[in-house]
Amino acid sequence: MRRLYIDFDGVVMDTIPSLYSALEKSGVDTSNQREIGIFFSTFDFRTIINDDFILNDSINCINKLIESNRFEISFLTHVNSLDEGCVKVNYLRSKFKCITIIMVPKEISKTKVVHSEDAILVDDYSGNLTEWEDNGGIAIRFSKDLESHGFKVLNKLDELLNMFDEEGNLKC
Ligand SMILES: [Mg+2]
């Protein structure tokens, strides 16, 4: 089975548009990284991590991936605060009993926390995918509008079943 790491924000859950619109409305000076950091670390993620924000049927798609038995699945998500991490773990654990959940501090590369070599990362952020490829991993971009940015791209997680064969090898 091939290891498969699934990002959370912008892949499982459509948190990004609401988060950035809340940032805009807050009056925070968006040229000030410190202020932005404080906003993110004090934001109540419960308001955007719930069933209303499920992205392109992600939960059902992940269940299909589990049933296929082709992947050893983990969630791999950046967090701004421990509170955000708790909200994510509680939500994901309410949906999936057995999937490992790995929280990565925002300041650290995902490749520093898990072994990327020969593993798949599905992520919406090209920066993460570039680092992943540079460290021997297989990078797949998630994009609602199928914007590839030079990567293989999908907008529904069960498309992985078409992209990879029974052994978890990339088809083309
Ligand atoms: Mg993301």
Image (tube, rainbow, N blue to C red):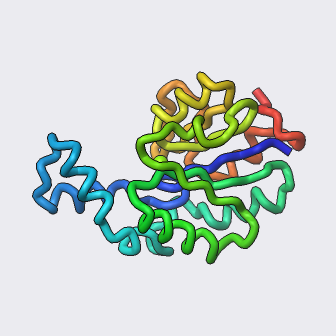
- Coordinates of residue 167 in the picture (x, y in percent): 89, 40
The reply, left or right, for residue 117 in relation to residue 134 is right
**How far across and down, in percent of the image, does residue 140 sit?**
61, 37
Instruction: Name the residue furthest right.
Output: 167
Residue 141: where, in percent of width, then height?
55, 38
**Residue sitting nearer the eye, 147 or 23:** 23
Residue drawn where x is 44% and y is 63% of the image? 82
Vertical placement of residue 76 versus 49, above or below: above
Q: Quadrant of residue 165?
A: top right
Image label count = 0
Residue at the image position 45 percent from the left and 73 percent from the top = 52
Q: Nearer the viewer, residue 42 or 132?
A: 42
Residue sitting at x 19%, y 51%: 35
Picture quarter with the N terminus: top right
Q: Is residue 80 left or right of residue 122?
A: left
Q: Is residue 125 above or below residue 13?
A: above
Residue 146 lies, in percent from the top left, at 50, 40
Quadrant of image for the C terminus? top right
Vertical order, 108 against 100 (above or below): above
The residue depicted at 76 percent of the width and 44 percent of the height is 3
Q: Seen in the image, is 151 located left or right of residue 107?
A: right
Residue at the limit of the structure toward the bottom, as seen here: 94
Based on the displayed image, in which of its 4 quarters is residue 122 positioned? top right
Q: Quadrant of residue 110?
A: top right
Residue 34 as seen in the image, left or right of residue 149: left
